[in-house]
Image (cartoon, grey):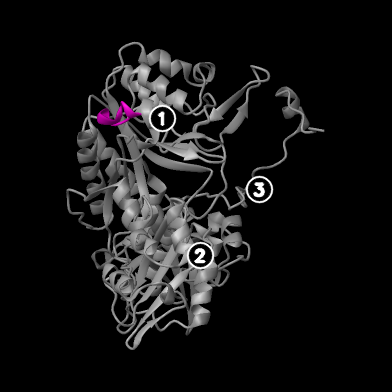
Amino acid sequence: MFRDAFCGKISKSDVGKTVTLSGWVDGRRDHGGVTFIDLRDHEGLVQVVFNPQLSEKIHQQAHGLRSEFVIKVTGLVSIRPEGTLNKDLASGEVEVLVSDLSILNRSKPLPFLIEDGEEISDTLRLKYRYLDLRRPSVQKHFVLRHKLSQAVRNFLNRHNFLEIETPYLTKSTPEGARDFLVPSRMNQGTFYALPQSPQLFKQILMISGFDRYYQIVRCFRDEDLRADRQPEFTQIDMELAFVDQEEIIGIMEKMIAKVFAEAGSLELALPIPRMSYAEAIERFGTDRPDTRFALELKDVCDLAAESDFKVFRSVVENGGLVKGINAKGMASLSRKEIDTLTKEVITRGAKGLAWIKMKPEGLESAITKFFKPEVLDKISKRFEAEPGDLLLFIADKKQVVHGVLADLRLNLGKRLNLVDDKQFNPLWVTDFPLFEYDETAKRYTAIHHPFTAPLDCDLPLLETNPLKVRSKAYDLVLNGVELGGGSIRIHEGTVQNKVFELLGITKEEAQSKFGFLLEALSFGAPPHGGIAFGFDRIVALLAGVDSIREIIAFPKTQRGTCLMTEAPSEVDQRQLKDLHIKKDLT
């Protein structure tokens, strides 16, 4: 037997017992002829003592122990001597007096210390991920991840959802990010795709008569990476039949509240507030607003039109926007600091940054001379400006103005210490547009995906003004991060075909890519809808880490590589021949 107890679970209640423990040598100390080892397993540390008075042979063996050796010890649990208690350890009141030692495995010298708080480069951590994962601070993230996944499963099981698996090898239907393709050996010249989501399959399950489905499922997207993206990720995926938006939101709110409670008694007040897409864009410039602080955007198009400032007037006359933010208390910024802000907004797509300092002695700006005093007074009132404030303006196309000011708002929120990291502000964003127009491609694209249903009252606009059509879509946003999104789906073939037509998908393309779905819809499809949550993002937020890589056991780098396994890698020429693939494209 390797153990009959766990290191981190040994306590005063075990005093007088003989226990067998196994684990890793976390640290070693020699004091007055006695050797002390901190023995670590997944439950924590315990101090084990090698005293020559108990066994000279065992004590000599202990001299050879080094960090990360794997050992088994048997000994008597005793109270630590007075003055040596360690209040930072759960087992800090006791120690184990070793009477038997077995070295189960030795370790080479380590590339870094297995200690919390050590500064280790990401490259080194990912190359030796198996060592990085031994650190208690890293392991606790995966304990949390497990607890949250169980909370989700338990909740959905109690609400009559069935966990049903969908294929990993499927048809390429690229309607979002780029697919990962898998060549088929048995069907030469053809390819499977790894699913970006189980979207079409879960709709098929509803058509098949399953009332409620879920998966905690792996998804794959071949896109450029950043801190909150990985080529393979996990989502909580759900679909329900004979439901409307209200029913789905109601169930999901209860599930998210349960997950938060499981993460450490975090209570979410229900119902979660809601905001339309139009209002979110108007007030915050983004459809995933962080509502923990104010600094809302203010539209000054009407006042800009009354000015003689040509930059503002021409933008308004050409259908653009002039909006701004009141940077509270930042009128003390130097010209150099404002120039730095200007450079930042230019890198995000703006042509420049206009500003007005609200000084006690009056307004300071190069643009105030173009405004009548009464107009400046209206601007001040609109922004609720006070002496010491700094008004910042962007004038450009709507998309540029909203995108740049949304980023600037977050930047200012951090600079002004307005963001409370311990506060959680969830928000439902609803009534998204069904389409947006891609100026480059000169066609409509779907805001969510092509299977999202339009609002019933907007159906006539599909024929006359598609950009005015709102959808039955809903996103759950938390502190400026999209946790998940979903929609009521199109369940009528005629509406689905019309949406495909507006998206520039011909009947032949629709049949080629989505023929099985269109065929299924023709056999009595029920009204249905669903949602998918980014499980990695939820865990990362509740774990208090910035990157989802911290809560994925074996993540990829930003170049999509695994430093530990060195994937992706070259493959044998024979494997390529079996797949009828040639690497030389010239």
Asked which secondary structure carries label 1, the reply is helix
- Where is residue 104? Give x, y as percent: 53, 56
- Where is residue 49? Give x, y as percent: 42, 72
Q: Disc 2 residue type?
A: Val
Q: Badge 2: how crowded within 10 Å, few (<14), some, or many (20+)? A: many
Asked which secondary structure carries label 3, the reply is loop
The numbered dot on residue 199 is: 1
Closer to the observer: label 2 or label 3? Answer: 2
Q: Disc 1 residue type?
A: Gln
Image quadrant occupied by the C terminus: top right
Q: Quadrant of residue 265?
A: bottom left
Residue position marked by numbered label 2 in the rendering:
345
Does 57 sit above or below residue 446? below
Q: Badge 1: how crowded within 10 Å, few (<14), some, or many (20+)? A: some
Query: Closer to the N terminus: mark 2 or mark 1?
Result: 1
Name the residue nearer the viewer: 306 or 311. Answer: 306
The numbered dot on residue 113 is: none
The part of the chain drawn in magenta is 454-461
Does 306 sit above or below residue 261? below
Does 71 sit above or below residue 432? below
Residue 32 visible in the snapshot: yes
Q: Disc 3 residue type?
A: Glu
Closer to the observer: label 2 or label 1? Answer: 2
Residue 456 part of the magenta segment: yes
Q: Residue furthest left?
A: 270
The numbered dot on residue 566 is: 3
- Where is residue 116? Give x, y as percent: 46, 68
- Mark 2 touching mark 3, by CB under 8 A? no
Name the residue nearer the viewer: 179 or 446. Answer: 446
Q: Residue at x 66, y 48 (%)?
A: 566
